[in-house]
Image: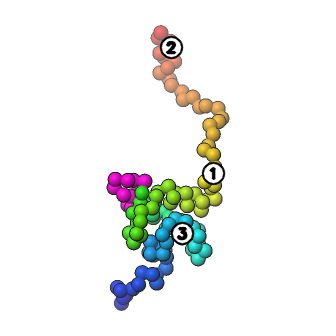
Amino acid sequence: MTNANTNIHNLHPIFHPAAHYDSPRSVLNDNELSTPEKRIILSSWASDMYAVESCPWLREIPGMSHTVRLADILAALRKLDGDNDNDDPPRGGGVPMRLRRPWAAAERRAA
């Protein structure tokens, strides 16, 4: 039978991450977690389930004493993917694609 009074601080961080981490950066800096485990924690924090009702850019994680900015969580996830936060936004380029509009030719003929 499982002891319901188990101290959450003795559990593996992946089962109750808010008891072990106070920010996305602290998750990233934990060398005992694998990259997939870090991604699981950060992705769960980014979930809309934890969105603050009047401030959707904030997350209120149960067990954490303060709110966390969604931008910080997403930046940590990008860092796991090897993306640099200082990257320039993607530039436009290439040949613009024109969609064929069969009705346009008919309109030109009719005019």
Q: Which mark is residue 86?
A: 1
Look at mark 2 in the image and give the residue it sits on: 108
Q: Nearer the viewer, residue 93 or 21?
A: 21
| Secondary structure under the numbered disc 3 in the rendered image | helix
Is residue 54 rendered magenta in the image?
A: yes
| Quarter of the rendering containing residue 26 | bottom right
Q: Which mark is residue 73?
A: none
Position of residue 110 relative to residue 55, above or below, is: above
- What distance separates the C-alpha of mark 3 from that of mark 1? 21 Å
- Which quadrant is home to the N terminus? bottom left
| Secondary structure under the numbered disc 1 in the rendered image | loop
Identify the residue at image location x=43%, y=53%: 57
| Residue 43 percent location from the top left of the image | 48, 62
Look at mark 3 in the image and give the residue it sits on: 27
Identify the residue at image location x=50%, y=66%: 23
Position of residue 65 relative to residue 70, above or below, is: below
Identify the residue at image location x=48%, y=75%: 20
Amino acid marked by disc 1: Asn
Amino acid marked by disc 3: Val
Which residue reaches farthest right? Answer: 94
| Quarter of the rendering containing residue 91 | top right
Task: Tell me which segment is drawn in magenta.
Answer: 48-57
| Residue 101 percent location from the top left of the image | 51, 25
Identify the residue at image location x=40%, y=69%: 65
Amino acid marked by disc 2: Arg
